[in-house]
Amino acid sequence: MAEEMATSFGAQAGDYEVGRPEYPFDAVAWMLEKMPVGSRRIADVGAGTGKLTRVLAGAPDAEIVAIDPDPKMLAALRIAVPGVPTFAGTAESLPLPDSSLDAVVLGQAWHWVDPVTGSAEIGRTVRSGGVLGLIWNIRDERVSWVRRLTEIMHGSNAEVMLADGGPEVAAPFGPLEEESWEWVRPISRDHLHRMASSRSFVITATAEEKARIRQEMDDLFDELGLDGESTIDLPYVTRAFRAIRD
């Protein structure tokens, strides 16, 4: 089931693109600020529709490649971020030469990766002193209606992992540093539904379970007075991590 969920997103690539938030520029810059001087070769692994890729591609002189196991997600990425080379692959099996990168980053993806195998394979492609960056946008469940929304949709693997102490990386990378950013995203009722539809639990759920989730979400939105024309501020905490290759 875990593998099915990890590779399920392409079926809802459009909902993923619309429903999922962008990454704060400052968080992405922090992940990469310890790259060696003159670095510019970066791989976005588990790139999906390019939410993180488009932030990376905005850096001057950056050379970006995007890697994902799902061809439907890569097709959406090529539309969203034209000109970035794309390759099929995973963190555990990268189609890239040894020591060819200055950094590898993963957005909303490391929780699907075997940390020992993934760290070793990424370490093969990243030169000494290069960076492994991990980042997640997590809804801030200190807010009661957001907590209720998660209960309806079910918590994700990422949310469980971060609540249990965070990610782990292995050799040849050193210890992880962490930073976080709090922000809000104005979001409509339709986009909240599309966010839910892009989640692996919902994608792989039965038709009956999908209908239950949608109805309970609508009941919550009715209570909040969120009609078709309005938006509500959805609070996020972006959690970023970085480690340096030995």
Image (cartoon, rainbow, N blue to C red):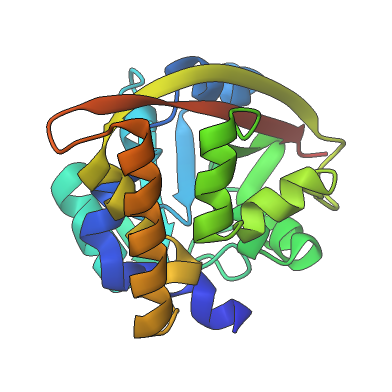
Vertical side of 45 occupied by 118: above or below: below
Residue at x 84% of width, y 53% of height = 170
Camera sees residue 38: no
Camera sees residue 136: yes
Q: Residue furthest front?
A: 223
Residue 165: x and y, percent? 85, 44
Image quadrant containing the N terminus = bottom right
Residue 162: x and y, percent? 74, 45
Horizontal arrangement in the rendering, residue 15 relative to residue 114 (left or right): left
In front of the other: 212 or 182: 212
Image quadrant containing the C terminus = top right
Vertical side of 23 occupied by 165: above or below: below
In front of the other: 146 or 120: 146
Residue 244: x and y, percent? 76, 33
Vertical side of 121 occupied by 20: above or below: above
Residue 213: x and y, percent? 41, 64
Residue at x 68% of width, y 62% of height = 121
* Quarter of image, res 141: top right
In front of the other: 12 or 234: 234
Residue at x 18% of width, y 44% of height = 80
